[in-house]
């Protein structure tokens, strides 16, 4: 038997029916993936059973897709440490930003047996003090814990709610096309966390400019999972009932200060993880076959300098 956490009966049923998991074949699937990793001279990856099965589940047990995603995961974290957490992680700096409450993971999944819910409040950080790139890196601390420990997110996916209230031009100016591309590529090609929907609420003037820039960078499937509600909360509640929001939003899904305190304890407990992570990554000089064409992968430049946000 593989050394992995047992899934709840509900999650196991979903893994079998929707992710193509065959429990009796898990040992063979994990062994095949571990053998492939050992044969890649350029790749040093974690090979424990739980890490590998999380990627397999995130790729619906397609071995080839799983190989590509693990490779991309480590390749991007090694090549662009300023964008993606990997080596030389400043946990204290990231915690300073995390405490602002820009990103909150909610404890109850949608309908209690569906996707994990994440609330993003972009106006919680001061764009004159921090960059969105730094905020994204801080979010990576939580993302890694979910990737390692959150079977609900791995099996059922993740729904994000972006509250855009009080977002300013200063926030939007930090979202360059090149940075947006790096975010979308990493989310779609490197992470085994499957986005099931992104909901935008309280969108200000000028939002369409950003939205229309990011949307074409996403796959057609993910484009179909974008929902812009403007200021119509009822439209959001039709898909995410109010009770699944935190108490500060009139819901029953935890208090934001308490959730942040709980997550800070989890992040602190992961300090050794980032020390260990220095041992993993890629060395492109050892890659067999075609080199990664980073220029075509992220071939966008520019930012938004003519933007008015109310």
Image (cartoon, rainbow, N blue to C red):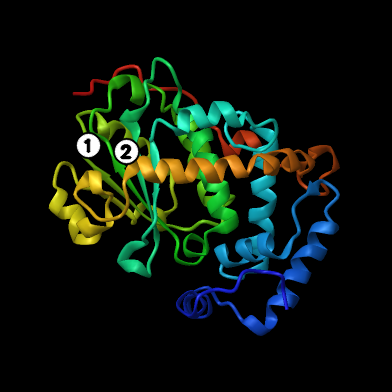
Alpha-carbon span between mark 1 and mark 2: 10 Å
Give the image location of residue 149, x and y in percent. 57, 58
The quadrant the N terminus occupies is bottom right
- Secondary structure found at label 2: helix
Q: Nearer the viewer, residue 297 or 107?
A: 107
Residue 101 placement, left or right of 145: left
Using the rendered view, name the quadrant where residue 208 is placed: top left
Q: In the rendering, which numbered label is found on residue 211?
A: 2
Q: How many marks?
A: 2
Measured as percent of width and height from the top left, residue 276 is found at 75, 43
Q: Residue at x 52, y 64 (%)?
A: 151
Q: Position of residue 283 (x, y in %)?
A: 80, 39
Is any atom of residue 187 visible in this view?
yes
Q: Is residue 44 left or right of residue 71?
A: right
For mark 1, give the secondary structure: loop
Q: Is residue 300 visible?
A: no
Q: Nearer the viewer, residue 99 or 102?
A: 99
What crowding class fits label 2: few (fewer than 14 Cα within 10 Å), some (14-19), or many (20 or more)? few
Circles 1 and 2: CB atoms closer than 8 Å:
yes
Dividing the picture into quarters, in which one does residue 60 lie? Answer: bottom right
Find disc 1 in the rendering and name its residue: 203
Residue at far bottom of view: 24
102 versus 106 height, above or below: above
């Amino acid at each position: 038997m593989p050394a992995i956490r047992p899934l709840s009966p509900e999650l196991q049923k979903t893994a079998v029916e929707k992710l193509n998991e065959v429990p009796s074949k898990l040992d063979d699937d994990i062994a095949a993936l571990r053998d492939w990793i050992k044969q890649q001279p350029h790749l040093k990856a974690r090979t424990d059973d739980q890490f590998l099965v999380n990627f397999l589940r995130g790729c619906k047990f397609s071995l080839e897709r799983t190989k590509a995603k693990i490779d991309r995961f480590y390749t991007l974290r090694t090549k662009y440490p300023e964008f993606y957490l990997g080596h030389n992680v400043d946990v204290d700096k990231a915690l300073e930003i995390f405490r602002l409450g820009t990103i909150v993971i909610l404890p109850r999944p949608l309908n209690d047996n569906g996707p994990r819910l994440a609330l993003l409040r972009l106006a919680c950080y001061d764009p004159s003090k921090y960059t969105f790139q730094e905020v994204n890196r801080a979010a990576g601390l939580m993302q890694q814990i979910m990737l390692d420990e959150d079977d609900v997110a791995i099996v059922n996916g993740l729904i994000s709610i972006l509250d855009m209230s009080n977002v300013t031009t200063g926030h939007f100016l930090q979202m360059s096309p090149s940075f947006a591309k790096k975010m979308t590529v990493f989310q779609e090609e490197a992470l085994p966390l499957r986005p099931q929907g992104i909901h935008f609420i309280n969108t200000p003037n000028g939002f369409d400019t950003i939205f229309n820039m990011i949307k074409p960078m996403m796959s057609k499937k993910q484009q179909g999972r974008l929902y812009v509600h403007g200021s119509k909360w009822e439209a959001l509640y039709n898909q995410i009932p109010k009770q699944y929001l935190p108490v500060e939003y009139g819901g029953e899904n935890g208090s934001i200060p308490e959730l942040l305190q709980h997550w800070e304890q989890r992040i602190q407990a992961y300090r050794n993880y980032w020390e260990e992570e220095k041992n993993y990554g890629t060395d492109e000089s050892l890659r067999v076959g075609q080199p990664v064409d980073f220029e075509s992968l992220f071939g966008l430049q520019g930012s938004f300098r003519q933007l008015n946000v109310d």
